[in-house]
């Protein structure tokens, strides 16, 4: 029977996707470990990855098999780039990538069961030797009832040319994450209006960043009162004309003006511009984990139509939970906000409406989420899941027992001691906040 080339290719693709893979010597998967974690392979075809522009590459996603399902292999065209400012100084690189069609248009796909989208982040835990701090923060924020970036632990490989031969080089454990963006499957709010823009129908997503990172963003503005820099993530370049930028900037400036003048007589309140419950939850969460970057970087703010601004989602918590040596954030005792001179936070915590909400929400979440039992169980499940892969990770990155910035001293010698230290810090933080929450 004659089989056309088109049908032959379709059959071949189905066989690759739905048959097991033995990773025999000599095939494209030589060097890939059998793992209970998914494996990702990035092949740039010999091209260098840069911060900008994105380099064209091929992403191979290998999902491990089980008793019910066979191992699957999928391939995607991607544009990939390095991400992060400090991350560029460490050997375990961080990546952002966009899944693309063959003509470089973004393409929405589901990766490892997560909802379909085009933009993704590969975060590689390095100075956080538990490998868990970001995952733990995102999980807890979601349990509080908020949108939080979904993530999957993976083992990453890059195809390298060594002695003129391609070989898969192991890069360790990474967390494949949803990039924060406005999307029906991620942080969803109404689309930006195209005409008759006003305070009511205005929608946006912005991110606070330090002035030294201004070069990393082209769509940004500086506020008048706090002189803070914000990058505009949504709307994107296609919709963000001069008029829309003015409306976003004006809205944030009006909010700041009222926030810093809250003790004066005004017809309006800054609560007309921002949701106080959102502010209280964000402050409470960051106090609990003592994130020293709070209100300094990675602060996302979004606004839906016919609504006020909200803070979140949370992002970048590798120096939280005591993993920092240059502030009191290393200790489970003490209020983090007492040491901060940051955008908005000083004025927020002077408002008894906000501080009373913080106290109320702590007592509410202490009944189910902020408990040692719940958090230890979440940690234990991931420690068990990463058991074999984390050994390979620390063979590749032989850093256990080594002080990496900003690890506080003394540095645990083993992975088990890292986990024990994390649990001990969280338990002590809960105990201290229980005893002192009424003084916040």
Image (cartoon, helix red, strand yellow):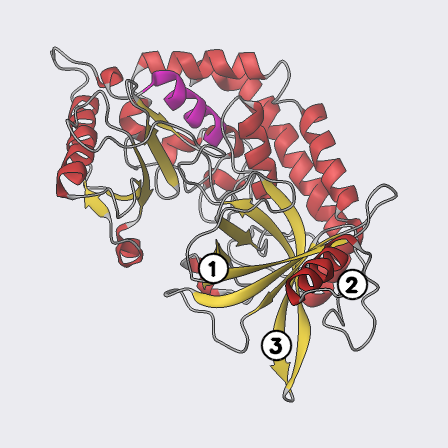
Q: Mark 3 points at which residue?
A: 160
Q: Which of marks 1 and 2 is in front?
A: 2
Residue span colored magenta? 275-286
Residue 380 spot, x, y in % from top left: 75, 37
Q: In this view, does 335 lie to the left or right of 35?
A: left
Closest to the observer, 195 or 350: 195
Asked if residue 142 is positioned above or below residue 105 in the image, the reply reads above
Q: Which residue corresponds to the image point at 84% horizontal and 45% vertical from the top-left?
A: 66
Q: Which of marks 3 and 1 is in front?
A: 3
Tag of residue 87: 1
Q: In this view, does 239 lie above or below 285?
A: below
Task: Choose the circle earlier in sequence order: 3 or 1.
Answer: 1
Disc 1 on helix, strand or loop? helix
Main SS class of the magenta portion in the image: helix
* Neighbour tally class for label 2: few under 14, some 14-19, many 20 plus, Cα within 10 Å: some
Residue 280 part of the magenta segment: yes
Q: In 3D space, how far apart are the residues under numbered discs 3 and 2 (Cα atoms)?
A: 17 Å
Residue 231 placed where, x, y %? 28, 45
Q: Mark 2 points at which residue?
A: 33
């Amino acid at each position: 029977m004659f089989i056309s080339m088109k049908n032959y290719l379709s059959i071949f693709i189905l066989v690759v996707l739905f048959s097991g893979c033995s990773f025999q010597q000599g095939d494209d998967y030589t060097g890939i470990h059998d793992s209970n974690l998914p494996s990702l392979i990035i092949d740039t075809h010999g091209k260098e990855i840069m911060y900008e522009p994105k380099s064209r590459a091929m992403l191979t996603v290998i999902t491990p098999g089980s008793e019910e399902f066979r191992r699957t292999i999928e391939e995607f065209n991607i544009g990939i780039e390095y991400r992060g400012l400090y991350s560029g100084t460490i050997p375990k690189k961080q990546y952002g990538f966009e899944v693309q069609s063959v003509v470089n248009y973004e393409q929405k796909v589901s990766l490892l069961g997560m909802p379909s989208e085009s933009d993704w982040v590969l975060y590689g835990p390095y100075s956080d030797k538990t490998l868990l701090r970001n995952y733990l923060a995102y999980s807890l924020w979601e349990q509080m009832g908020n949108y939080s970036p979904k993530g999957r632990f993976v083992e990453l490989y890059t195809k390298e040319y060594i002695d003129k031969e391609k070989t898969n080089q192991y890069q360790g454990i990474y967390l494949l994450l949803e990039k924060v963006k406005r999307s029906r499957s991620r942080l969803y709010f109404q689309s930006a209006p195209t005409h008759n823009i006003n305070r009511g129908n205005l929608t946006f997503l912005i991110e606070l960043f330090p002035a030294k990172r201004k070069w990393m963003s082209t769509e940004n503005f500086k506020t008048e009162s706090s002189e803070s820099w914000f990058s505009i993530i949504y709307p994107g370049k296609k919709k963000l004309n001069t008029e829309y930028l003015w409306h976003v900037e004006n809205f944030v400036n009006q909010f700041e003006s009222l926030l810093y003048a809250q003790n004066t007589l005004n017809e309006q309140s800054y609560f007309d511009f921002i949701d106080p419950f959102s502010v209280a939850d964000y402050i409470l969460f960051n106090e609990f984990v003592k994130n020293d970057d709070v209100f300094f970087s990675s602060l996302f703010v979004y606004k839906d139509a016919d609504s006020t601004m909200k803070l979140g989602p949370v992002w970048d918590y590798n120096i939280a939970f005591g993993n920092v040596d240059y502030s009191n954030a290393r200790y489970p005792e003490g209020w983090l906000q007492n040491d901060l001179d940051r955008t908005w936070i000083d004025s927020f915590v002077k408002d008894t409406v906000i501080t009373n909400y913080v106290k109320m929400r702590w007592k509410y979440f202490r009944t189910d989420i902020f408990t040692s039992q719940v958090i230890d169980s979440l940690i234990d499940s991931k420690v068990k899941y990463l058991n074999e892969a984390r050994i390979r990770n620390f063979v590749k990155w032989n850093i256990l027992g080594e002080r990496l910035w900003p690890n506080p001293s003394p540095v645990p010698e083993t992975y088990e001691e890292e986990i024990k230290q994390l649990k001990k810090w969280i338990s002590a933080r809960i105990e201290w906040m229980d005893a002192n929450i009424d003084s916040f």
